[in-house]
Amino acid sequence: MQYLLSVIDDGAGSATATEQADTDAFNDRLRAQGRWVFAGGLGAPTPATVVDNRGGEPVFTDGPFVEAKEWLAGFWIVEAPDGDVALHLAAEGSRACNRKVEVRPFL
């Protein structure tokens, strides 16, 4: 089963060199364990554009979809046999990147 581990940032600052190194080491462990599917970091939401093409013409709105103190800063997609393993991986990832991590299963 695959899980999305979403990294939540509060804008306190960019990752430190230690956080980056710890995250790289966590990524290496995921690969070595065969749990790595894909991961990526995201920039701050301010330059985002929301696209809504549910009507006759697309509407483009500058800025993030939701104004919030916290936002999605990155993610991992991992393979795990169950939610408990996914939670354990999220705890390791949270420690590595020094941010909160949300866990959600793919359907």
Image (tube, rainbow, N blue to C red):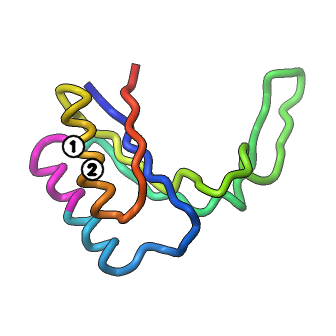
Give the residues drawn in magenta, as a range. Answer: 26-35
- The residue shown at (84%, 32%) is 58
Q: Quadrant of the C terminus?
A: top left
Label 2 with label 1: CB-CB less than 8 Å: yes
Residue 88 spot, x, y in % from top left:
21, 43
Magenta stretch contains residue 55: no
Instruction: Please give the name of the residue rendered at 78% of the width and 32% of the height, measured from the top-left corner.
Output: 52
Instruction: Identify residue type, mark 2.
Output: Ala
Q: Which residue is mark 2?
A: 91
Q: Which residue appears farthest toward the left when viewing the image?
A: 32
The answer to whether residue 92 is left or right of residue 105 is left
| Between 88 and 48, the one nearer to me in the picture | 88
Please state the horizontal and vertical placement of residue 55, each as a whole percent of the image.
Answer: 86, 21
Q: Which residue position holds label 1?
A: 88
State whether residue 92 is above or below residue 60. Answer: below
* Position of 45 relative to 87 (above/below): below
Please name the residue shown 38% across and 38% down the image.
103
- Asked where in the image residue 82 lies, by quadrant, the reply is top left
Under circle 2, the secondary element is: helix
Q: Is residue 104 left or right of residue 18?
A: right
| Residue sitting farthest toward the top | 107
Three-letter amino acid code at the position of disc 1? His
Q: Residues within 10 Å of mark 2 (few under 14, many from 20)?
A: some
Structural distance between the alpha carbons of marks 2 and 1: 5 Å
